[in-house]
Every structure is written in structure tokens, then in C-alpha cells.
Image (tube, grey):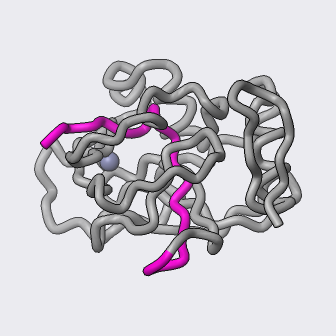
């Protein structure tokens, strides 16, 4: 049974108790966010290109220059944007969603669905575009997912999504760039 509470407008619907906790805690001040998991600790796809433009070679100073402060907080320090803020929640046009940090293609609009959570949600990522790892922050066991190309944090994956995958990629809109078809 879905949990519905009246914070925000429209009211936010939580899929389960973990999701409810996630929603409540995502609004915590920055100082209470989980420790920044430095990007080099993330499991990354093996490099086949050692060029200077490889996003995995960028320094934190270069990331700060490339991203907005909110993008940096979310993508480099595993932050979560407040629910309901992203204009991409209401984006229903055909098109493609790219990583805001490195422009890698992550999601096709055909896999986007209205989860009612306040975050852009997809039931499938483009094959090979994201990696996952276990996240035990905030007393919850969740699966974090990130861009396989640059390692930037994108959101969490839950197993309460629609068919055909049953997955819900709960994504920070600030970590995405939409490209209309
Ligand atoms: Zn990326």
C-alpha cells in the first residue's frame, strides 16, 4: 500500500517506508548529508581512453567549475535534491536524458513514468550507461546509481517500479539534461 502525506503541493506519495524516510531526510541541511564519498571510491567502468578530456581525470576544482553548486552537491557528494523541485518531473515530451556532468546518454523518454515521488523516475536506463553500489547511509539499505562514464551520482534504484523491469530509477533532476526529440 502506498503511503501518502501532505507535505508539498501536490501531496507526495511514498512507495514504502524506506522511500518515505528518503523523502523526509532528503531535505536535511547540507551539514547533515552523508559524508561525501569521493568519486575515486566509486566503481567505474574500466577506462579505454586515457585522453586528457576523460571526465574521470578531472580534479574536484575542475568539477566545481563545470557544475553548478547544486549539481556539485548532488553529483559529487551524493546529495539529494528536494522533492518536487525539478522541472523535469513534468517533462513528458519525447527525447533523451543525458548526464548533466559529462553528457552521456542515460534514459530514453519512453521509459519515464509518473512515480508521484517528486523526482524524475524511469523504469530502465540505457544499457551500460549507469553503475550501482550499495548505500547504507541514513540507516537505510538502498542501491545508489551513478553515471558509468563520469561516476557522477544520479539517484537510487528501487524494486517497486512498473513493468517490464519492475525497477524505479529515482533520479535527481539536477543531474540530468533533457534533449527533446
Ligand atoms: Zn556522466
Q: Residue at x 45, y 32 (%)?
A: 174
Foreground residue among 50 and 181: 181
The picture places residue 146, in percent across and down from the top left corner, at: 46, 56
Quadrant, the N terminus: bottom right
Q: Is residue 31 left or right of residue 105?
A: right
What is the span of residues highlighted in magenta in the rendered image? 163-181
Q: Quadrant of residue 127?
A: bottom left
Q: Quadrant of residue 23?
A: top right
Q: Residue at x 62, y 39 (%)?
A: 118
Q: Is residue 151 magenta?
A: no
The picture places residue 25, in percent across and down from the top left corner, at: 82, 39
Quadrant, the C terminus: top left
The picture places residue 73, in percent across and down from the top left corner, at: 56, 30
Q: Is residue 17 left or right of residue 154?
A: right
Decide: is 28 above or below 52.
above
Decide: is 139 above or below 31.
below
Amino acid at each position: 500500500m502506498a503511503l501518502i502525506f501532505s507535505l508539498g503541493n501536490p501531496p507526495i506519495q511514498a512507495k514504502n517506508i524506506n522511500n518515505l524516510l528518503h523523502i523526509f531526510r532528503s531535505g536535511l541541511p547540507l551539514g547533515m548529508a552523508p559524508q561525501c564519498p569521493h568519486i575515486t571510491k566509486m566503481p567505474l567502468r574500466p577506462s579505454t581512453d586515457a585522453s586528457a578530456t576523460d571526465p574521470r581525470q578531472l580534479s574536484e576544482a575542475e568539477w566545481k567549475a563545470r557544475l553548478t553548486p547544486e549539481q556539485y552537491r548532488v553529483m559529487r557528494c551524493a546529495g539529494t535534491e528536494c522533492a518536487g523541485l525539478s522541472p523535469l518531473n513534468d517533462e513528458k515530451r519525447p527525447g533523451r536524458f543525458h548526464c548533466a556532468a559529462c553528457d552521456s546518454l542515460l534514459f530514453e523518454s519512453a521509459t519515464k513514468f509518473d512515480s508521484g515521488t517528486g523526482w524524475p523516475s524511469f523504469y530502465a536506463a540505457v544499457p551500460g550507461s549507469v553503475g550501482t553500489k550499495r548505500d547504507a547511509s541514513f540507516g537505510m539499505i538502498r542501491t545508489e546509481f551513478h553515471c558509468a562514464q563520469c561516476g557522477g551520482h544520479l539517484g537510487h534504484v528501487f524494486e517497486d517500479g512498473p513493468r517490464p523491469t519492475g525497477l524505479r530509477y529515482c533520479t535527481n533532476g539536477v543531474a540530468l539534461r533533457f534533449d527533446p526529440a
